[in-house]
Image (cartoon, rainbow, N blue to C red):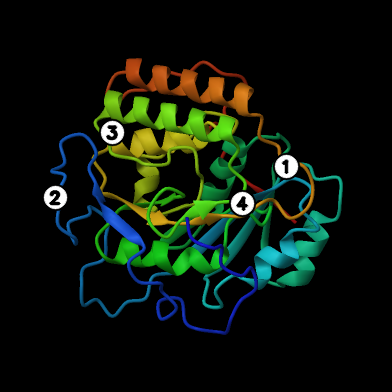
Amino acid sequence: MTSPPARTPDGTNSLLDSLDQGRVSDPIPGNGHDPHTRLGNGRFARRAGSAEVPRVSVVIPTLNEAQNLPHVFAALPPELFEVIVVDGRSTDDTIKVAQQLRSDVQIVLDERIGKGFALARGFAAARGDIIVTLDGDGSMDPREIPAFVEALLDGADFAKGSRILQGAGSDDNTQVRHLGNRGLTGLVNVLFGTRYTDLNYGYSAFWRPALDAITIDCEGFEVETLICIRVARADLVVREVASFEHRRLHGASKLHAVRDGLRVLRTILRERLRRQGHVTVAMTGDPCAAYEQTRV
């Protein structure tokens, strides 16, 4: 494990010029992919030599993160196309702080609480070529976004953060969470023929057309597992990116290891039993049933 990077930005390097080298894994195949898939064959990836710079949207779910957002926003790369904060009924000044920090921030209000609901609303609102998911508690370093973008430009359809790869790590992963994540990651790899190293970590980026494969019909933290499985079943090219997880800066974590671990397990088994290309889900308040968003 390496030492965590500083949390404050160290300059105004461009989105791609500030890349750390050697932080991206070999491609991870979905069903039917050769493990030695070469770069550049992702279904949605921009081809090498293209002069077009992709527009990057960052989706940040929040629930009472007013104290954490100044640290998160300060480290965002300067050339982002848009920043979308999806707020799940915060009772503090989260929305006000976000608007003070960034005048062009897009606020999407979600009357329901849950990361799955929030991401579904955020993805619907995003207009960029690339969509990045980032937590609002300060645990994920926004300065790593260029590494995710580079993985997509190099040929991936979906870039997945990993705290396990060389150069990555965590100072917030308890023994219970580590063991649970390891077991669930192994189960997904066996059942779906993938090679993920860190299933339950939500830092990710993908090309906008991948949304067709990432239909969200769950409400909580299990959304990270759902996305990974559906990306694999759609045969998208996945690359893992080394990422360091910090401790939450302020406030209490919303994650409950046992409860959310069981939700993840149920999601895995449900996805294993469903037919390829067809999903039937019975749930109350399906977040995908209404994509229209309420803006502030």
Q: Please tell me the numbered disc located at residue 257.
A: none
Work out how far the residue at label 3 is from the one at label 1, CA to CA, in angstroms.
30 Å
Residue type marked 1:
Gly
Q: Position of residue 96 (x, y in %)?
A: 82, 61
**Image check: 217 left or right of 174?**
left
Residue 287 shows in the view = no
Badge 4 element: loop
- State the residue in front, 277 or 237: 237
- State the residue in front, 155 or 201: 201
Q: Is residue 292 above or below residue 242?
A: above
Residue type marked 2:
His
Q: Position of residue 189 (x, y in %)?
A: 30, 31
Work out how far the residue at label 3 is from the one at label 4, CA to CA, in angstroms.
25 Å
Residue type marked 4:
Asp
Depth-wise, is mark 4 or mark 1 nearer the camera? 4
- Residue occupying image coordinates x 29% and y 37%: 232
Depth-wise, is mark 1 or mark 2 nearer the camera? 2
Quickly name the residue at label 2. Answer: 36
Quickly name the residue at label 4. Answer: 135
Badge 3 element: helix
Q: Quadrant of residue 206?
A: bottom left
Q: Please tell me the numbered disc located at residue 88.
A: 1
Work out how far the residue at label 4 is from the one at label 1, CA to CA, in angstroms.
13 Å
